[in-house]
Amino acid sequence: MAAASSLSLSPERALAPAQLEACRARLDCGFAAVQAVLLDCLREAESLLSPPGLNAWLDCARTLGKMGRGPEPVLALLQAWPQVAHSVGEDLLDEVAGLLQLMQKSPNSGAMAPLLQTLPAVARRLQGPDPLRRYLRTVQEVMRRSTVSLHGHHATFASPGLPVLLVQAPRLLGLLNVTGLARWADYGLRHYLHHPERQREYFAVQLPDSRAVLQRERHGTLLADVERQLELTLRGLWQDQNPAPLRAYATGFDGLPAPAPWSTHHTPHDSLCLPDVYDDLNGISGLNRYRLALAHLAGHRRWSQPLLADNLSPLQRLTIECLEDARIDHLLLRRYPGLRPLLLALHPTPVEGACDPTVTSCLRHRLALLSRALLDPAHGYRDAALNECAAAFHALLARDESSTQAMQALALQHATRTRRQSDQLARVFFDNTVVSYRDDNRHLWRFIEAGDEEDSFADERPAAEPETPGLPPRHYPEWDAASQSYRPDWVSLYESLHPRGDAAFIDALLAQHAALARQLQQLLDRLKPQHRVRIRHQEDGSELDLDQAIRSVIDWRAGCTPDTRILMSHRTDGRSIAVLVLLDLSQSLNDAVPGTGQTRLALSQQAVALLAWAMDRLGDPFALAGFHSNTRHDVRFMHLKGFGERWDETPKARLAALQAQYSTRMGAALRHAARSLSAQTADKKLLLVLTDGRPSDVDTPNEQTLVADTRQAVQELAQLGIHSHCISLDPQADAYVHDIFGQHATVVDRVEQLPERLTRLFVSLTR
C-alpha cells in the first residue's frame, strides 16, 4: 500500500471540513455504515492517539476495507483500537495488523471481527503491552494448530474453537493470567483437535474438563482484580493524589525468570509496572505483596535521586542499588513500622558460605547477605566487611544523612573492599538472592550519551491541550442467548443533547389537553405529601416537647444530668421517587394513526409533555431521553431533559424537535439509562419505556436475539433496584412484551388514548 501523507487533526472544538475530508480520503472506504460513525470515531481517536498513531490507525482500517470482508472488521477497528492503544500503547498496532493478515490468508477470516471487538476488554484486563503480545501469540497458535490439523487437511477448515475463544477471552482473563490462558487453550487443542463440536464446547467452558482445567490454572491474585485497592493505597498511605497508572507485564513463561517491577518515573509515559499476577509467598498474600511492591516504588519516587551511571562498573552499580533499596526500606519502616514482618518474610535469607567463590561468581550472594543484614538486626553473619558496612549504614540513618549520594559513597567503599576476581565468572550464584518486592532500579540511573546535549535545547513551546467535541462512545455488552454469556463491548452508544425546536409547540399540545389536565390535577393533589410527622428529642426545634421537658425537670431536681433534647420539629412525609422516561424514536413512529390525522410520534410528544407536566406538579425529579439505532456500532441516546434541569422552555424545545428514524436496539439504551437512574438518591427509581415495536436492528436477522438481550437488561436493572415498566403502542405486543418485562408492561391498543393512559399509569405506579 502506498504511503499516505501525514495528517494532524486540529485541537479545535470541531473538526474542520477539510480535515474531515482528508481523513475520509486517507481511509478510502465507501461503506455507508463506516461513514456514518467516522466523525465520532475521529473525535475519540483525537483525544487518545498521537498524530502518528492516528495516521497508522486510519491506514490499517484502509487495508482492512480492501480485504473484501465487508464493513464489520473496519468498524470494529475504528471503534476498538483507540481504547486499546490508550490501555497498552500504540506500538502493538503492527502486531494486531499482522495477525489480521494471517487470518485473511487462512480460512479464519471470519474471526477478524470477533478479535477486534473483544480487544478493548482484553486490553483492560491485561493492562500492559507484554501480556497483550502473549495473548496475540496464543490466538495465533490456536488458529494455526486447529486449522492445519483438522481432519488431516492442510489449511482447509476454519478453526471451530477460535471464534468462541475470542468471545470468551475477556471473561477467561478475569480468572487466569495470560500464561494460564495459553495452557488452558493448549489442553483443549490437544484433546479435542479432531472433534469440532467438542472443541467449541470446550472453549465455551461447557465441558466438565474445561471447567476443571480452568480451576487448576486459576491461581494467585490478579493485578486487574486489585487495581482499585492499590490505587486507593497510593492515595491514602502515600498522599499521591494523582497516582501514576498501574501497568501489568506477563509472568510465568516457561524457563524464564519473571522480571522485577519497575517505574518509568521522569519519562513522558509515567507508570508503575507490576506483575500481572502474584501468588501467595511465605504466608504473605498476593494482595499484600502488591502493596509492598507499590510501597517500595513509592518510596523510590519520593526519596531517591537519579545518579550518573556512565563511569560506574556493574559491580559498583549493583552495590549502590543494594544500599539504596535498603535505605528506602528503612524509611518505609519509619513511617509504617507494621511493614517489618512483611519485609522480613519476603526478603530471602541467604546462608553464609553457601556460594563457592572458586567456581562461581558470588557477587549477588554477597549483596543478598548485605541486604539481609541491613534489614534484620538479628542476621548473625560474621563477615567483617559486611558488618562494618552495616554499622556505617545505620550511623548515616541515625544522623538523618541517608541521601542517595551518601549511599553511593558508602557503596563504592564497600565494593572496593569486597571485590574478587571470581566476580567476573560466567556462572553466577542466584539461590536466595532475589528480593521479589523490589524493583529493577532503572529509574535510578541516567546515561550521558552522544547527542544528549542537544535535548536541552528542545522546543519548549506549550502544546495546546486538545479538546474533544461531544462525548466519546460508551461500550456496552450484549447478551448472547446461544452461549448464555455476554459479548463484551459489543454495542457502541453515542449520547448527545437533542437539538431544539419551538417550545411553543409543546405549550399548544398541553392546551389541547386542558380538560384532561384538570381531571389529573385532582389526582395529583391526592398524591402530594399531606401528612406532617413529628421529630422528637431535638436540640433545636420549633416547639417544646412537653413530655421530654417534664422528664428533664424531674431529672434535674433528683440531682441527675437532664437531657437537653426537649424540643421537637415537624417535616412533611414526602415522596422519594426518581423517574426516567425513555422514548423509542425508531422509524415506525412516523406511521400515521388511522382516524386521527396524526402520527404516532405526535401522539407520543403529547403524552410525554402531559406526563412531564404532571411530574413537575408533583415535584418528582425526572428526566426525558430518546434513542434509536443503526446497527450495533451506532446507537444514539439523546437527552431531552436531565434530572438537574427545570421543566421550562429548553427541554420543551428539545421535545418539540423530536424526529424518528432507524431501528430499536433497546438493551443498550436501557443499560445506559440505568447509569443516570442509579446515581439518584430516591427511594424508588422508575424507568418508563415508551415503544411501538419489538427490539430489532438491521444487523441482527434473528428477531429473538435482541428480545433476549432486552430481557437480560431488564433483569440487570432489577438487580440495581430500578423498576422498569413498558408502554407499548404495538397491537401485537402481547406476543413478546410480557416475555421481556413480565407483568410490568401495558399495551395501548388505541394509540389516540396514549396521553391519558400514560399519565394515569404513572399516577398508579407512584401512588
Image (cartoon, rainbow, N blue to C red):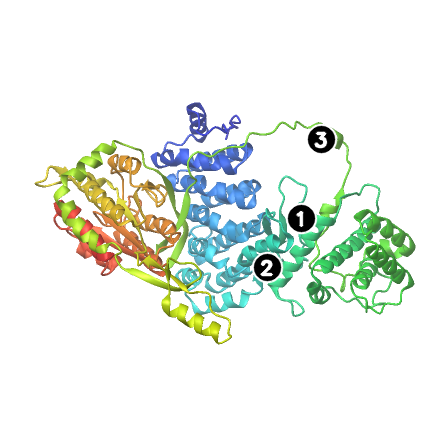
* Relative to 744, residue 83 above or below: above
Q: Nearer the viewer, residue 131 or 97?
A: 131
| Residue located farthest toward the front when viewing the structure as drawn | 557
Drawn side of residue 380 relative to residue 698, left or right = right
The residue labelled by disc 1 is 263
The x and y percentages for residue 420 are 90, 56
Residue furthest to the left in view is 595
Q: The residue tagged with tag 3: helix, strand or loop?
A: helix
Pair 2/3: label in front: 3
On residue 455, the disc is 3
Relative to 624, 13 lies left or right: right
Q: Residues within 10 Å of mark 1 (few under 14, many from 20)?
A: many
Three-letter residue code for mark 3: Asp
Circles 2 and 3: CB atoms closer than 8 Å: no
Q: Is residue 265 left or right of residue 428?
A: left
Alpha carbon distance from label 1 to label 2: 17 Å
Which residue is drawn at the image coordinates 67% and 52% (left, top)?
Answer: 298
Residue beneath disc 2: 277
Binning the other alpha carbons within 10 Å of mark 3 as few (below 14), some (14 to 19) or many (20 upward) gives few
Query: Residue 575 has which mark?
Result: none
Rendered location of residue 737, percent (x, y): 22, 55
Whether residue 70 is visible: no
Which residue is rendered at x = 23% and y = 55% of the image? Answer: 527
Residue at 37% across, 70% down: 547
Name the residue: 86% across, 57% down: 395
**First in sequence: mark 2 vs mark 3:** 2
